[in-house]
Image (cartoon, rainbow, N blue to C red):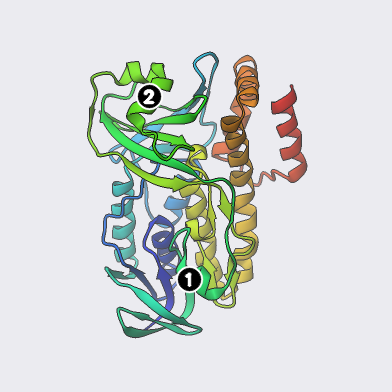
Amino acid sequence: MKSDVLVVGAGPAGLATAIAAATKGLHVTVADARRPPINKPCGEGLLPEAVEALRGIGIELNSSLGCLLEGFRFSDGLHSASAPMARGRAFGLRRTVLHELLVGRAVEAGVNLRWGARVSDFASSGARIDGEYFRFDWLVGADGLNSSVRRWAKIGRLRTRRNRFGFRRHFAIAPWSRLVEVYWGERAQLVVTPTGAGEVCVSFFSSDANLRIKDGLAEFPEVARLLKGAEPTTVEQGTIVGLASARRVTAGRVALVGDASCSVDGIAGHGLSLGFQEALELGEALARQDLSYYESARRRIASLPLWMTRLLLLMGASGWIRRRTLRLFESQPDLFATIISIHTSKPQGYAFDAKEMIDLSWRLLWA
């Protein structure tokens, strides 16, 4: 058997890449040892750039699928700042719903989906899928942080910063706002994302592998009060989160996408947005038969999410920086609105260069 492209990993980034390549006329096969729906714990917020990227592969989101989000709120219990989404639309959407949408669109696009299939014995022009030899022209690793494709292709290890732990649970309660609310504590951060008319998703991040949402809520009395009496609708799920990126993401006819190429800590909410934007550019590169196009585009796409994630992790790690930054946001709402605008959806053609990042960082930390 043969395909133009073999994608290893059928998470959101892998499926989006397959769809993007298939709509360019390539024959694509996706193989994953898991079966749908794949439900990785995440904050379930889709930023405007993610929504726009999904539209680019033929998936249109609306309020019947999730919850339209209006902006962000940061709070540490003493200081609070809110800002709207300046451009585009954002959604809170169950990960399982998103995966079902991607699978359905992949089927429509003619992608060959191999569920419960293990890929092994990689070679330059083929691999074995459940023991059967399968030939390809291009290989895409969408198989996560511990990518077997990356190891085989010797593309190099991810440069990893300190890992943390993230936990997620849903609660049956009408959202009290249409904002993504980020609460900052001394030991952890908590994010509340509306995902439907009668449900919110609570995500919890800390460096303590033994700390769970129930106990961690003691550090966030405002959220504990709002959730009082609300019944959980899902079991608590956890995963390792962190900031990691590969120096390069291609080698020969092999490319990495999604967490295999770059992972951003869940506190930033950029993971799906980054993965979907990468997928669009990789689909274009595969159609052009030029992975250097993807290498260049991926550096451009990843620069801002990596910078924003470093800033937010710095706020989480240092009480002094966090308090100073939140006081600044509260006293200068226009500045916070600018940060959120950059964070969620850059203006078309906007170039956020290194000098601007440094200037804005100093302003946040020393103003």
Q: Position of residue 165 (x, y in %)?
A: 44, 42
Q: Amino acid at mark 1?
A: Val
9 or 21: nearer the viewer: 9
Label 2–label 1 contact, CB within 8 A: no
Label whose residue precedes the other's in the sequence (2 or 1): 1
Count neighbours of disc 2 (C-alpha within 10 A) and say few if under 14, some if 14 to 19, many if 20 or more.
some
Q: Position of residue 338 (x, y in %)?
A: 63, 29
- At a point 37% along the width and 75% down the height, the residue shown is 119
Numbered tag placed on residue 67 in the rendering: none
Write down the residue under mark 1: 149
Q: Quadrant of the N terminus?
A: bottom left
- At a point 64% along the width and 42% down the height, the residue shown is 307
Q: Position of residue 286 (x, y in %)?
A: 52, 72
In this picture, residue 285 sits left or right of residue 300: left
- At a point 48% along the width and 40% down the height, the residue shown is 269
Q: Look at the picture and state if 326 lies above or below 151.
A: above
Q: Which quadrant of the view contains residue 57? A: bottom left
Q: Amino acid at mark 2?
A: Leu
Q: Look at the picture and state if 348 lies above or below 140.
A: above
Q: Position of residue 355 (x, y in %)?
A: 77, 41
Query: Whole-Å distance between the Cαs marked 2 and 1?
Result: 39 Å
Write down the residue under mark 2: 217
In this picture, residue 23 sits left or right of residue 132: right
